[in-house]
Image (cartoon, rainbow, N blue to C red):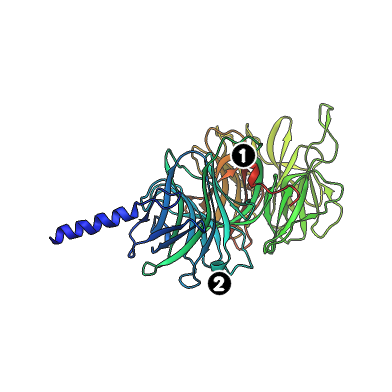
Amino acid sequence: MLRVAVVSVFLASALQAQQPVGIFENHSDVGAVLHEGAAAYDPAKNTYTLTGSGENMWTTHDEFQFAWKKVSGDVQVTALVRFLNSSGNEHKKAVLIFRQSLDSGSVYVDVALHASGLLSLQYRDQQDGATGEIRSRPMTWVGASEATTIPRRLRLTRQGAFVYLSVGDPSRYDGESIRIPLEGDFYAGIGVCAHDKNAIEQASFTNVELKSLAPESGQPVLYSTLESVPISSGDRQVMYFARGRFEAPNWSRDGSYLLFNRDGHLEKLPVKGGTPEVVKTGDQNRLNNDHGISPDGTQLAFSDNSQETKSPDGKTGHDSLVYVMPIAGGTPKQLTPVGPSYWHGWSADGKTLAFVGQRSGDFDIYTVPVLGGDETRLTTAKGLDDGPEYSPDGQYIYFNSERSGHMQIWRMKADGAEQEQVFSDDYNNWFPHISPDGKWMVFLTYEKDVTGHPENKDVMLRLMSLEDKKITVLAKLFGGQGTINVPSWSPDSKQVAFVSYQFIAPEDAMSPDR
């Protein structure tokens, strides 16, 4: 009789968990929770209330209450989200979520509202893999108590291989996007996690809309997002985003601001947040994305193609030339006599610049004195050499070269001697940047079938320990050209800045003048 009773209780619990709730097919607890969750729908208020336990939605597995519906293709879920009380763990989460399966270690992506006010796009891109995170810009007006009482309108959109986050009413893209391998049918819905295995928490979801998206009729809108990523965790932080294209972030020597290139100008963005301002560069107003600050922080080097140039065969054009100017302002000084020339590195003593120059049809690595003088050619191998950057101790120049058959990372002595390949693999690797403490190298990786360094590609930022040459993936993103063309380490060697890109449906794009 005891066995029959246990089976009856189990069946009753299972049936209760599988009853439809509003627009959702059913609801259930995901993972091993100590307290059974619940889901209720109030049609008069068009509100879902989810009650759930669970230790966390993080690392390699999740525990939470989930109301879901099976979907496929391009879909979108929208809701006003809030917690029903201000108590509990500040990291408890109310989520809109797409999930491959109901397994606790499933591939998934969600927008998670935390009780602390933190908003982030969280994801697991392989079964039982580690969770990643892209944090939204901090909302200084939202604290723990406000986050429980002020509903936030959130939207999660799957568009092709990518998922992105929008906020507000009307919804506007918030700068966070990620490629997630959701295949065939998957689960879409809402969830709540207590972030405490012994606790039970509640969240409400009002005006929930879950819909399939028709093929986009309007032109997708391009957005650029400036992000930072700590090498210790890989948890990405959105610092600034805008409609259109900007490129190549470069951290100031004191860590207080970042430079990036947009529309032929450099712009300066405070790290603590604010509105970017244009850096004056005199008559040079067609800057490309190669720029950098001297080791002592007093000078700025950049490449620009404003000036009319003449090639050896007599043709006129606007080839890129290298300039240097006081960072506080002044008249830029031209250093390279002919183009195209693209700046990439300062020597440790601030006396020499390394650049890429095309001479007689070949792109090679050159140096030129900051005070002016003749350029010196350092590489002569057949094939493209690019991206030269000095090591912090001034002993080496790291660069990328296709001399071995495809693009790989190389280094040489500062005078061009002892040219050697740093490592070898099947990818195409570009733009090595050495951390200020000399311990790490970050670089941009394309798939092996990609030639050059084009924009709008799936790429990786990879990190190498220079001590043992161990390589790890720091971030996967949609980018390429413009992502990390220039030195992008924070001065303390703890973070890397980069730019990612995303094409957004027109209805989620803000007006161009915002």
Of the pair 174 and 496, the residue shown nearer to us:
174
Compare marks 1 and 2 and give the one earlier in the sequence. 2
> Which residue is rendered at x = 81% and y = 29% of the image?
312
Residue 51, given in percent of the width and then of the height, sits at 41, 63
Badge 1 marks a residue whose secondary structure is loop
Outermost residue toward the top in this view: 313
Residue 496, given in percent of the width and then of the height, sits at 60, 55
Residue 36 located left or right of residue 412: left
Residue 507 located left or right of residue 323: left
149 up-or-down from 361: above or below: below
Q: Give the residue pinned by disc 1.
A: 456
The 10 Å Cα crowd at callout 1, few under 14, some 14 to 19, many 20 or more, is: some
Q: Quadrant of residue 228?
A: bottom right
Identified by mark 2, the residue type is: Ser
Q: How many marks?
A: 2
Residue 138 located left or right of residue 195: right
> Which residue is rendered at x = 69% and y = 64% of the image?
254
Identified by mark 1, the residue type is: Asn
Q: Quadrant of residue 428?
A: top right
Q: Give the residue pinned by disc 2.
A: 145
> Which residue is rendered at x = 62% and y = 38% of the image?
453
- Inter-mark Cα distance, 1 to 2: 41 Å
Of the pair 216 and 349, the residue shown nearer to us:
216
Could you tell me which quadrant the N terminus lies in? Answer: bottom left
The 10 Å Cα crowd at callout 2, few under 14, some 14 to 19, many 20 or more, is: some
Q: Which mark is residue 176?
A: none
